[in-house]
Image: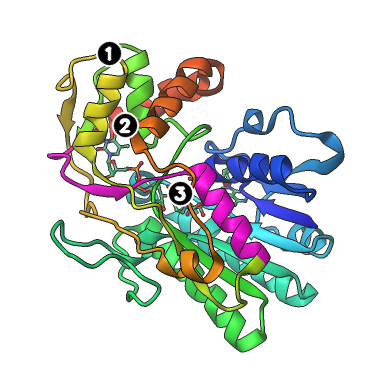
Amino acid sequence: MKLLVTGGAGFIGSNFVHHVLDTTDHSVVVLDKLTYAGNRASLDGLPAERFELVVGDIADAALVDRLVGDVDAVVHYAAESHNDNSLHDPRPFLDTNIIGTYTLIEAARKHGTRFHHISTDEVYGDLELDDPNRFTEQTPYNPSSPYSSTKAGSDLLVRAWVRSFGLQATISNCSNNYGPYQHVEKFIPRQITNVLDGVRPKLYGAGQNVRDWIHANDHSSAVLTILDTGVIGETYLIGADGEQDNRSVVETILELMGQPRDAYDHVTDRAGHDLRYAIDSTKLRTELGWQPAFRDFRTGLEDTVAWYRDHQDWWRPQKAATEARYQQQGQA
Ligand code: NAD
Ligand code: TDX
């Protein structure tokens, strides 16, 4: 198979491209605009005969039409992905997440191309800390931020294109990913690279917010499973039973890095900050037989700390500008 992977120079997209080239015979064309979040270096060392990077915008209809017409399937990761940025400047989120997705599904419909849409559990809003229920495929949409509302909008576009136009699409909504190649603006890499720089980690508010962590490799294996055996028109939730509150994550990072567990600062909370996400991935596990490989969060985090310690050339060019942005926003 030849795959078009949008956003393949970003965090999860690049992990997926490495996973596909390592574990299958597929070839991959990446379409990526190389925004501040995209990094060519995340795709270094891939086999040239099976891999190509096209730098361009998913909202460029002529380019998208040409690329979609030349592949067997599209896996759509490209997005503006950071909640904090969406609170300060929502417009790029509408352009990429809504118009970009629209542009891709129009091309996929025209060419009859298989389409897999990558989305997030944030479309479901948040849960109380003591809610015994987790998100399922039946949970009503209730997004909180400009980011999550544009992701919800893009999911609904894909669903409508399936029903009205017979688009050959599946959708997955995954929980918070961690692992290599994640931009230093995000929670876990921000704290690891702060500690490496001798700066105290920054916890929003009291840090009681819960995220359901999954290793990016497990997200990739789940997407490949859905691409191979998922039922057209269906949505699958992806999660690995990894709930942790933010305070515990910061304390574990500090401990793994040889620092006192309380050596962090509380900073201004995020506006509208979702309290808790939690995924019930029973459907994916029972209907498609998927299982996560990374079951121990602490070990996965230890590997991630080691990766950032060993790849300073990869993240250092972004660090100062990212922290300057947090400084402006009062979260430094
Ligand atoms: P990221 O910000 O690291 O990467 C996004 C990539 O998309 C970048 O390479 C960027 O250059 C590219 N891009 C942005 N706008 C583009 C455009 N208009 N045209 C072409 N390329 C463009 O994001 P990520 O964390 O890797 O997330 C990837 C996808 O996974 C997103 O759709 C996101 O909603 C979803 N997701 C992320 C998480 C998570 O924990 N990070 C969890 C669930 C779902
Ligand atoms: O410095 C920080 N301190 C802090 O306490 C940062 C950057 C974040 N946080 C908190 C906010 C969240 O509760 O940590 C948690 C995780 O924050 P992010 O890494 O920004 O992730 P989140 O907002 O949960 O969204 C992520 O998971 C779902 C991705 O960025 C989204 O793209 C994905 O859809």
User: Which of 188/57 is in front?
Assistant: 188
Q: What amino acid type should be assigned to the residue bearing mark 3?
A: Ser
Which residue occupies 21% across, 27% down?
Answer: 251
Q: What amino acid type should be assigned to the residue bearing mark 1?
A: Gly
State ligand 2's quadrant.
Answer: top left
Mark in the foreground, 2 or 3: 3
Q: Indicate whether 161 appears above or below 121.
A: below
Q: Quadrant of the N terminus?
A: bottom right
Q: Secondary structure at mark 2?
A: helix
Neighbours of disc 1 within 10 Å: few (<14), some (14-19), many (20+): few
Q: Secondary structure at mark 1?
A: loop
Q: Secondary structure at mark 3?
A: loop
Q: Which residues are magenta?
A: 204-228
Q: Position of residue 187 (x, y in %)?
A: 34, 36
Residue picked out by circle 3: 81
Answer yes or no: disc 3 within 8 Å of ligand 1.
yes
Tell me which label, 1 or 3, sits earlier in the chain.
3
Which residue occupies 66% across, 39% down?
Answer: 18
Q: Which mark is residue 258?
A: 1
Q: Which mark is residue 326?
A: 2
C-beta proximity under 8 Å, tags 2 and 3: no
Neighbours of disc 3 within 10 Å: few (<14), some (14-19), many (20+): some
Answer left or right for 200 relative to 173: left
C-beta proximity under 8 Å, tags 1 and 3: no
Answer left or right for 321 relative to 248: right
Tell me which label, 2 or 3, sits earlier in the chain.
3
Answer left or right for 54 relative to 250: right
Answer yes or no: disc 1 within 8 Å of ligand 2.
no
The reply to whether the magenta stretch includes residue 207 is yes
C-beta proximity under 8 Å, tags 2 and 1: no
Q: Indicate whether 197 appears above or below 47.
A: above
